[in-house]
């Protein structure tokens, strides 16, 4: 079998890119069962995958939306990803809609593009988040695509969005529309997550800023238009989110990464100075509908809270873009890493559109509170800060099996690829 694969790789390496597009990995004669977790955050964080363009080369560029799964059941994690950028909108413009969802097949770190037809792709949509969960409890991972086309000059400042399900059967992903792709803020899903919200054994969905979609288990969904944060958003959209039981009470909790970009957007929407810069919120799960206590959120104590100072808007957090959940200190309580953005002034960037990207770590105290221990693991010299890195994704994982967790930069290119624990016990940037 190995000889055959080697021969195949030699043939492939002589093919043009177009021919590569038609290449499908031969079926694995002895498929390895996938590990399928009950939440999308676990399927992302609990696997062995880590994708860094600085360390490996891929047949296509991708960003903005990607997820892991073992498509060909060979034990290597493959990638679902959004590819294909619209000419003239800029390669890194997340607002563009001319994109595909493709699959990159991993075979011992050699990457090839799988057949386009594997995913029943819907054209002209803007995938901002992809999650994998077993939506139908048939033992394989299905894919959820959350859509949000950012308002911009080229699209007349519209807000298009929708929610797609790609149900996996017999090697292909079949499209179903959960929420039609249409215009309007209630369908603008910049983020999303999946977990069993009501504890009935079926994975449910939360789309965008608190839109809850319950899974009936018979192939239909309750798009009840219930909005967890209706009238309660405080001017903040959810730009990232994760759903998992943080406090071990049996009910799924939400960790929401909020956004308010800048004061011009935040304050007219009803935001207050007290909430400005506080972009990391936890909503505790409960037994009764709507299954989350939306009235008593835990606002995580960021180290970058400038309320009460003249730096409130110039330095306060503008958005939290990614959340990693892991038991970092190994006390059997799930801890939280968040990656956030903040506007910054010179000397970084050009002083106008510059960003400070930073990571913060919250230790779970086991009593529904968290302590910000960012300085404890990174020191106080700004090692956790990444000026103008454009970084949006992280995960925490022991990639080298040395017993210490590494903190991994995903997808984006930057002069380092991860944080590693040093001899002093503190984490530092390294290649
Ligand atoms: Ca399935
Ligand atoms: Ca459910
Ligand atoms: Ca809980
Ligand atoms: Ca812990």
Image (cartoon, grey):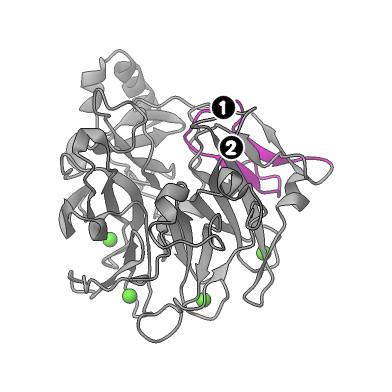
User: Which quadrant does ligand 4 occupy?
Assistant: bottom right
Q: Residue 265 location in percent, x, y? A: 40, 50
Left/right of residue 60 with respect to residue 415 in the rendered view: left
Q: Is mark 1 within 8 Å of ligand 4?
A: no
The residue located at (55%, 54%) in the rendering is 277
Question: In what element is the residue under mark 2?
Answer: loop
Q: Nearer the viewer, residue 249 or 237?
A: 237
Q: Residue 242 location in percent, x, y? A: 46, 61
| CA–CA distance in space, label 2 to label 1 | 8 Å
With respect to residue 334, does 359 lie above or below?
above
Q: Is residue 43 visible?
A: no
Q: Which residue position holds label 2?
A: 344
Q: Which residue position holds label 1?
A: 349
Q: Does the magenta run of residues contain 301?
A: no
Region of the chain picked out in magenta, as a range? 400-423
Q: Is mark 2 within 8 Å of ligand 4?
A: no
Q: Residue 213 location in percent, x, y? A: 27, 69
For the stretch drawn in magenta, the main secondary structure is loop
Badge 2: residue crowd in 10 Å (few <14, some 14–19, many ≥20): many
Badge 1: residue crowd in 10 Å (few <14, some 14–19, many ≥20): some
With respect to residue 255, does 381 lie above or below?
above
Q: Is residue 271 visible?
A: yes
Q: Residue furthest bottom?
A: 288
Left/right of residue 217 with respect to residue 43 in the rendered view: left
The residue located at (35%, 55%) in the rendering is 132
The residue located at (22%, 33%) in the rendering is 154
Q: Residue 346 location in percent, x, y? A: 62, 29
Q: Do the residues bearing badges 2 and 1 touch, measured as CB atoms within 8 Å?
A: yes
Left/right of residue 186 with respect to residue 421 in the rendered view: left
């Amino acid at each position: 079998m190995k000889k055959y694969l080697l021969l195949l790789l030699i043939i492939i390496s002589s093919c043009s890119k177009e021919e590569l597009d038609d290449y499908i990995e031969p079926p694995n004669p002895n498929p390895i069962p996938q590990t399928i977790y009950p939440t999308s955050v676990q399927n992302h964080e609990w696997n062995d995958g880590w994708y860094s363009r600085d360390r490996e080369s891929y047949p296509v560029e991708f960003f903005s939306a990607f997820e892991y799964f073992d498509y060909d059941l060979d034990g290597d994690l493959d990638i679902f990803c959004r590819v294909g950028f619209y000419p003239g909108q800029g390669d890194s413009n997340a607002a563009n809609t001319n994109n595909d969802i493709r699959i990159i097949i991993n075979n011992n770190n050699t990457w090839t593009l799988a057949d386009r037809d594997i995913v029943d792709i819907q054209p002209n949509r803007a995938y901002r988040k992809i999650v994998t969960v077993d939506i139908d409890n048939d033992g394989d991972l299905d894919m959820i695509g959350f859509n949000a086309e950012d308002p911009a000059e080229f699209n007349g400042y519209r807000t298009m969005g929708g929610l797609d399900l790609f149900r996996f059967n017999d090697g292909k992903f079949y499209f179903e529309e959960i929420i039609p792709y249409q215009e309007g803020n209630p369908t603008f899903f910049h983020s999303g997550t999946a977990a069993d919200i009501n504890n009935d054994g079926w994975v449910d969905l939360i789309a965008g800023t608190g839109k809850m979609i319950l899974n009936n288990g018979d192939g239909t969904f309750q798009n009840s238009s219930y909005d967890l944060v209706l009238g309660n958003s405080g001017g903040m959209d959810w730009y990232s989110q994760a759903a998992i039981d943080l406090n071990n009470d049996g009910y799924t909790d939400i960790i929401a990464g909020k956004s308010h970009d800048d004061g011009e957007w935040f304050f007219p929407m009803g935001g207050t100075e007290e909430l400005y810069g506080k972009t990391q919120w936890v909503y505790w799960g409960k037994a009764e509908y709507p299954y989350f206590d939306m009235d008593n959120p835990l606002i995580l104590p960021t180290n970058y809270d400038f309320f009460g100072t003249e730096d409130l808007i110039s330095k306060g957090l503008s958005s939290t873009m990614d959340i990693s959940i892991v038991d970092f200190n190994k006390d059997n309580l799930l801890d939280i890493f968040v990656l956030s953005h903040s506007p910054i002034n010179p000397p970084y960037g050009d002083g106008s559109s510059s960003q400070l990207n930073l990571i913060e770590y919250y230790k779970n105290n086991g009593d529904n509170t968290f302590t910000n221990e960012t300085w404890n693991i990174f020191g106080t010299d700004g090692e956790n800060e990444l000026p103008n890195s454009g970084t949006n994704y992280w995960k925490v994982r022991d990639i080298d099996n040395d017993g210490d967790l590494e903190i991994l930069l995903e997808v984006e290119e930057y002069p380092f690829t991860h944080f590693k624990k040093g001899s002093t016990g503190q984490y530092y940037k390294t290649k």
